[in-house]
Image: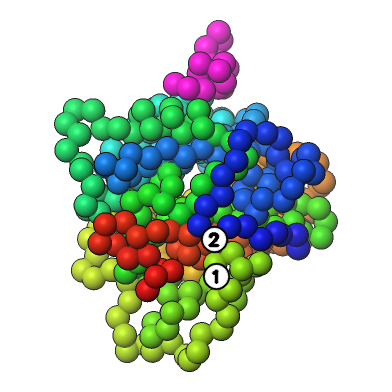
Amino acid sequence: MRHRPTSANKTTGAPGGNAAQSGDRWRNLITDVDGLRVGNAEDTRVRSGVTVVIADEPCVAAVDVRGGAPGTRETDLLSPTSLVQQVDAIVLSGGSAFGLDSASGVSAWLAEQGRGYPVGPVHVPIVPATILFDLLNGGDKAWGEQPPYRALGKHACERAADDFALGNAGAGLGAIAGEVKGGLGSVSMQLPNGITVGALIAVNAVGSPIIPGTRTLWSWAVEQDGEFGNQGPPPSMPDWSLPYGKQRPKPGGNTTIGVVATNAALTPAQAQRMALMGHDGIARAVRPAHSPFDGDTLFALATGRNPRLIDAAELGRIGDAAATCVERAIGRAVYAADALGDIPAFRTR
């Protein structure tokens, strides 16, 4: 497995060739999957933001929804039985249902670039999206008839690059994870056969990423190169008598959303399996997960840059790697996040 250490709470950089393709460096980000770029845009006054994953060329996609209160756009289109088999971008947004408008901004930007599914002389960008609920985090949501999300979607596209910020960035800006600040996290890994797998997760869960009665993240065992503070094992077994997670959760008020990606050449059905298996990472890193109050949604992307034929056994390894990356990305998101208003950061608890 290939990985490298990165900074505790922020990773940034300028646009350039993907590391897995150009060999310049390993970022420990989803953009190590060659053919993908990520852009973030935030409105600090609103305490919300948007993250976009842009494929350099249309790629195979799938989705798996496990939460009881999801908010999504164009997910039915990703069924293996549907006509369109590839997407141009995936959007993760704050703002609850208002945030779905961010995908319109992304679509408009892509259309300006001549991207999209060809229908005669017209190109229609394919941009599935999912949202998390951050409307009660203390930000100014009095935006009237002009929610900021369409503009944030376009701005995120303009900032898409191989390097991008984590923690209080993009869709993770206003996120809360249990009783601490949530955020945006990303990691990657390379399998022995050369296949690269990565994850990008915005963590806003009703459940807690912290083992009850400890200062240890549930995901401690899969940490690589100190990416969330050299956790080490918990000092004791979980104290199950302690409450954990947000108090009195409300339907639609939470959610862990994200993207798992690989440079393998997967079919839509194989990508669906990858997304399904990736959800195991949420269940390992957050408890409870997939609750009636969460909208947990995970997209899968396969860029096909590695043409290796993937059989069932290798698909199982890719799916397991996706779950591990999701688990690590959640830990990294929480560790990278800074306090926001009266929402405490995990690092300073």
x%, y% of residue 308? 82, 46
Q: Residue at x 73, y 43 (%)?
A: 19
Q: Is residue 123 magenta?
A: yes
The residue drawn where x is 43% and y is 29% is 155
Of the pair 281 and 16, the residue shown nearer to us: 16
Q: Whole-Å distance between the Cαs marked 2 and 1?
A: 7 Å
Q: Helix, strand or loop at disc 1?
A: loop
Label 2 neighbour load within 10 Å: few <14, some 14-19, many 20+: some
At which x and y percent is residue 349? 37, 73
Which quarter of the rendered picture does the N terminus lie within?
A: bottom right
* Residue type, label 1: Gly
Camera-side residue of 149 and 346: 346
**Proximity of marks 2 and 1: CB atoms separated by less than 8 Å:** yes
Note whether residue 89 is visible.
no
Q: What is the x, y in percent for residue 52?
A: 49, 38
**Where residue 255 appears, x then y in whole percent?**
37, 56
Please give the residue where the numbered disc 2 appears in the rendered image: 8
Residue under pointer 1: 229
Left or right, 171 with reference to 140: right
Q: Which residues are magenta?
A: 108-124
Mark closest to the chain's N terminus, 2 or 1: 2
